[in-house]
Every structure is written in C-alpha cells, then in structure tokens.
Amino acid sequence: MKKVEAIIRPEQFPNLRSKLEEVGINGLTVSEVAGCGQQGGKQGVFRGTAYEIRLLPKVKVEMVVEEEHVDEICKIIQSTCSTNTVGDGKIFILPIENVIRIRTGETGNEAIL
C-alpha cells in the first residue's frame, strides 16, 4: 500500500475529485493548507497599501491505495491539475506499513477498499 499526497491549486480540486471518482477512488482526506515554493508570493493591496502574501492557499489531497494503482493516480493528478505554470504543486508517495479499519478491525487492503 502507498499513501499519495498531492498539494494542488484549490481551483483544480473539483475536477480532480471527479476524475478520481471515475476510477473508483472515493476515500480521500482533503485539507486546506498554505505554502510557498518556487512560485514565491504575490503582491496585494489593501486600502492603498501594498503588502506581500508569502504563503499561498493550496489544497492537500491524501489517499491510501494499493500499490498497483499509484502510477494511474499520479497520471490523473498531473493531467487534471497541471496549468503548466509554477505553483501547480507536488505529489508525494509514501509507503504504508498497515491500515486498520476501526469499525470492523479489517486490516491491509480490505481496510482501504
């Protein structure tokens, strides 16, 4: 099993959610986060005063999947969330040792399906 974490632009999330549902990925954890990277920040103006926004809003999407689905999911994330500009985000893939469904006690792949 692998955990796929994607940090994406907030406006890309609705399309990503639809595409993941189409391939049977329904279990997601979604968090509103803020971050910075190569994109840097942006300038804002409030009542005539300029200020710098250093952390930009992003969405973090997390899912635990069977290892054979990781490449397909990464391709979906890339094709759906890419705008070909700096700040599109990152995908992180982490190994998962085990999963336990609290309600039933199921473990492993049975717990994520």
Image (cartoon, grey):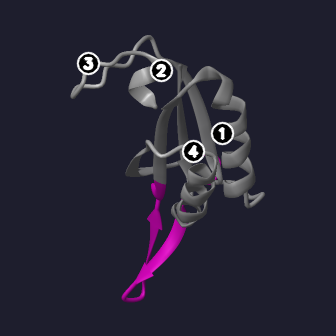
Residue 61 rendering spot, x and y as whole percentages: 48, 45
Q: Which residue is mark 2?
A: 109
Q: Residues within 10 Å of mark 2 (few under 14, many from 20)?
A: some
Q: Which residue is mark 3?
A: 105
C-alpha gap between disc 2 and disc 1: 17 Å
Left or right relative to 86: residue 18: left
Q: Residues within 10 Å of mark 3 (few under 14, many from 20)?
A: few
* Image point (71%, 37%), residue name: 72
Residue 77 rendering spot, x and y as whole percentages: 66, 47
The circle on residue 43 is: none
Disc 3 versus disc 1: nearer the observer: 3
C-alpha gap between disc 2 and disc 3: 12 Å
Q: Residues within 10 Å of mark 4 (few under 14, many from 20)?
A: few
Q: Which residue is mark 4?
A: 24
Between 112 and 1, the one lying in front of the other is 112
N-terminal-most mark, 4 or 2: 4
Which three-letter amino acid code belongs to the residue tagged 3?
Gly
Is 38 covered by the magenta stretch?
A: yes
C-alpha gap between disc 3 and disc 4: 23 Å
Left or right relative to 48: residue 38: right
Q: Which residue is mark 1?
A: 73
Q: Quadrant of residue 17?
A: bottom right
Residue 109 rendering spot, x and y as whole percentages: 47, 20
Q: Secondary structure at mark 3?
A: loop
C-alpha gap between disc 3 and disc 1: 27 Å
N-terminal-most mark, 4 or 1: 4
Left or right relative to 15: residue 100: left
Magenta highlight range: 37-58
Residue 40 in view: no
